[in-house]
Image: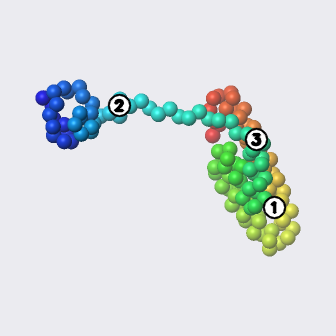
Amino acid sequence: MVFCRHCGRSFPSEDITYCPFCGKPQKDVSRFASPQPTPPASNKSPGKTLAIALLAGAIAFQGIGHLYVGKTKKGIALLVVGWILGGLAILFFPLAIVSFVFWVWQSYDAYKKAKHYNEYLARNGKGPW
């Protein structure tokens, strides 16, 4: 006779994983559970990445295209640099040209990162970063 560790009721077999009365585990069930599969990585559309980067960059959110592709640190850094450039461009107009060039460059870079991501995914079956 075996007693439940949680409710105290007795049951006849020692090979029971869960108590038939309260449903609580009697053994370490983590070893019986199958591991959760990781979802497969999916392609990132370079066109969608470019559109996201251009549209978000137009409203002072440069770096969002990099965040979409998975380059989190670079995306946040570009976002902060874009805000600083945008603020300085308001104070000093010639920096507006630099800000515009930065916006175009970060959009193109996000596009290239999406293409690189897809090529790496096709070769290796997982994302590069």
Residue pictured at 83% horizontal, 72% vertical: 92
* Residue 2 in which image quadrant: top left
Dots 2, 3 in contact, CB < 8 A: no
**Mark whose residue sits in front, 2 or 1:** 2
Circle 3 residues within 10 Å: few <14, some 14–19, many ≥20: many
- Distance from disc 3 to disc 1, alpha carbons, whole Å, reads 23 Å
Marks 2 and 1, the one that precedes in the sequence: 2
Marks 3 and 1, the one that precedes in the sequence: 3
Q: In the drawing, what numbered circle is on residue 31?
A: 2
Residue under label 3, please give it.
46
User: Is there any visible trace of residue 74 in the rendered image?
Assistant: no
Q: In the drawing, what numbered circle is on residue 99?
A: 1
* Residue 13 in which image quadrant: top left
Marks 2 and 3, the one that precedes in the sequence: 2
Compared with 12, 104 (above or below) is below
* Residue 5 in which image quadrant: top left
- Distance from disc 2 to disc 3, alpha carbons, whole Å, reads 42 Å
Residue pictured at 81% horizontal, 51% vertical: 105
User: Is there any visible trace of residue 3 in the rendered image?
Assistant: yes
Dots 3, 1 in contact, CB < 8 A: no
